Image (tube, grey):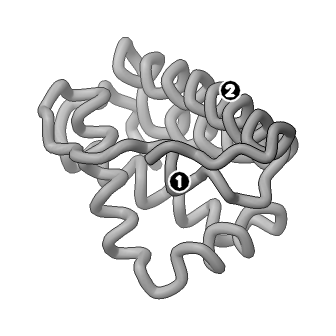
Amino acid sequence: MNKIKEIENIEDIKLLVDEFYGKVRQDELLKNIFNEIIQDRWPQHLNKMYTFWQTVLLGEHTYRGTPFPPHAVLPVELEHFERWLKLWTETVTTHFEGEKAERAIWQGQRMAEMFLSKIRYLRDNDAIPLY
C-alpha cells in the first residue's frame, strides 16, 4: 500500500514522473502520440521531466530549456490534454498530498491550458512557432 506524503525530494519527483509516463505509455488515446515523437529517447525525456519538476516543485534550478516548442506541432486536441490532466492528477493524488502536490496539479492545469491555446493559435493562423 502506498503511503501518501508530501513531495520532498528528487526521489519523489522520479516516482511521480515515472509512474505518470508509465500510464501515458499505456493509454489508448496518448500512447501513440508520445511513443511516435519520443521513440527510443524515453530515458532522456524522463530525465528532462525530472529536472523540470524538480525546478518547479522543489525550487532546485536544474531544468534548462523551454517547455513549449517540442509540443508546438503535436497532433493534439482538448481531449488529449484532458486525458493527460486526468492521468497527472490521479498520479499525484495517489502518492502525494500537501502544498507541492497541489502546486503540481495546478501547474499541470496551467500548462495544459497554455499549450492548447498556443497550439490552436499556431494552427489557426498558419504561424511558425518562435524557438
109 vs 72: above or below: above
Q: How many marks can you see?
A: 2
Q: Toward the viewer: 114 or 42? A: 114
| Image coords of residue 9 (percent x, y) | 17, 38
Q: Residue at x 86, y 44 (%)?
A: 79
> Which residue bears the numbered disc 2?
113
Which amino acid does the dot numbered 1 rest on?
A: Phe
Residue drawn at point x = 79 percent, y = 46 percent: 126
Q: Position of residue 24 (x, y in %)?
A: 64, 61
Mark 1, residue position: 20
Give amino acid for label 2: Glu
Decide which of tag 1 and tag 2 comes sooner along the chain.
Answer: 1
- Please state if 91 lies on the left or on the right of 127 as rendered: left
Residues marked 1 and 2 touching at CB (< 8 Å)? no
Note whether 25 is above or below 69 in the view shown: below
SS at circle 2: helix
Q: Position of residue 37 (x, y in %)?
A: 59, 74
